[in-house]
Image (cartoon, rainbow, N blue to C red):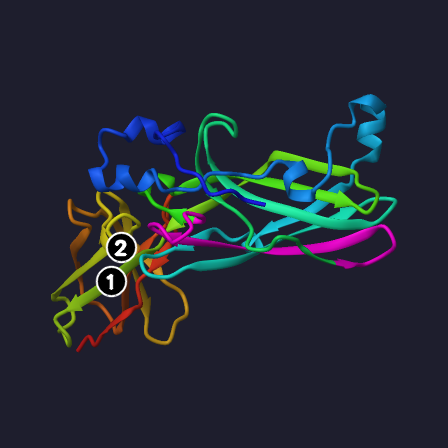
Amino acid sequence: MRIRATVAAVTGALALSALAVPAAQADAQGDVNLNRPSAAERFGASSDKSAFGAAAVAAAEPVVSNVKVNAGKAVVVGTTYTKTFTVSLTATHASGIEDAYIDLWHGTDIDEGLDGFLPPNEEAATCTATSATTSSCKLTISAAPGLNDDGVGELYANVLAGTWHVTVGALSKSGDIYWNDYYGTHKVQRASKLTVNASPEPVKKGRTITVTGKLSRANWETFKYAGYTNQSVKLQFRKKGSDTYTTLKTIKSNSTGELKTTTTASTDGYFRWSFAGTTTTPAVNATGDFVDVQ
C-alpha cells in the first residue's frame, strides 16, 4: 500500500542544485511521491526475525538471483511518453515463493537522501513456479518526464538522470522475507538524438565536403530536446557497398550542440556522426548521409 504525501524540501543530491533550478521545478518537487514501502508494508508480513538468531534468519530468507531491469539495458526516457519496462528475478525457498518486489530509487541514502522513486505498477508480482521451491517473478515499472497525476514514477528534474539504486525483495510461502535496498544499480537516461548533413551533393573528387549536424537530448523539465554541449562526437564514413564505418576525426559539439567540420571527397559513401554516450545520456548514431563523388 502506498500513501500519497509531499516532499517538504529538496533532498539528497538534488539539494546541491536547489538554487540553480527554476522556481516552477522547485514547486513541482513538493508534489513528488517518495513514499516507498517497507518489506512489511509490501508483503503484509513482519521481516523481524531477530528472535531466531542471525544464522536462522539467513537460512530462512529466500535466495534471489537473475535480477534483470529492462533486460539489462538502460532505461531511456524522452520528453513526451511514458516508458514502461519489465523487471524480473528468480527466487528460491524451501516452502516456495509467494511474491517478489523490485523498485528503482535515486539519491545518496534510502532513509534521508531519497530524491527519486520508480515503483512497480503491480501490487503483487506475477510469479511462475519452475519447481516446488523456485519461481520466476515479473513486474513492470513506468517512468515519465515531469509530473503525473499521482506523483509516482516521475523524472521531474534533469539531475535525476544517471545511476539509480535497485531494491529487490522476495516473500516465501511460509512468510520469510528477503529485502535489499542496495541490491544493485541501473542507468536511467535522457534520450538522445543526432542528425547529419553532408554537402555539396554530388561533389567532385578531391573537393571539400562540409559535414554538419546536431547532438541533442531530452530535457525532462521543459519537455523539449536541447543541444548537448561540449561533447566528443566522431565523424565516420562508410564506403558504398561496405557495412563498416571508419572514424575520420573527432570534434566537440558547440554551446548549442551543433557540429561542423570538413573533409575531402574521395569516393561514394555515407557520412554520419557517432556519439559514445555518457552516464546520463545514451549512445546514438546519426543515419548515414550519402554523397555521390564524381
In magenta, the rendered stretch is: 128-153
* Left-right relation of 214 to 3: left
Image coordinates of residue 102 in percent, x first then y, are 60, 46
**Residue at coordinates 33% horizontally, 27% vertically from top-left?**
15
Task: Give the class, few, some or many, for how many residues have Cα within 10 Å of label 1's Cα (few <14, many ≥20).
Answer: many
Numbered label attached to residue 186: none
* Left-right relation of 144 to 16: right
Q: Name the residue beneath numbered marker 2.
A: 223
Q: Name the residue beneath numbered marker 1.
A: 195
Image coordinates of residue 139 in percent, x first then y, are 61, 55
Image coordinates of residue 14 in percent, x first then y, are 35, 32
**Residue at coordinates 64% horizontally, 35% vertically from top-left?**
180
Quarter of the rendering containing residue 204: bottom left
Using the image as rendered, state which of residue 1 and residue 61 is in the foreground: 1
**Residue at coordinates 30% horizontally, 42% vertically from top-left?**
28
Q: What is the distance, in whole Å, between disc 2 and disc 1 at their CAs?
A: 19 Å
Q: Is residue 22 above or below residue 228?
A: above
Q: Mark 1: which amino acid?
A: Thr
Q: Mark 2: which amino acid?
A: Phe
Q: Is residue 180 above or below residue 272?
A: above
Earlier along the polypeptide chain: callout 2 or callout 1? 1
Image coordinates of residue 82 in percent, x first then y, are 41, 59
Q: Which-is-in-front pick, marks 2 and 1?
A: 2
**Residue at coordinates 61% horizontally, 50% vertically from top-left?**
68
Using the image as rendered, state which of residue 212 and residue 280 is in the foreground: 280
Taking the magenta stretch, the answer to whether it contains residue 145 is yes
SS state under label 1: strand
SS state under label 2: loop
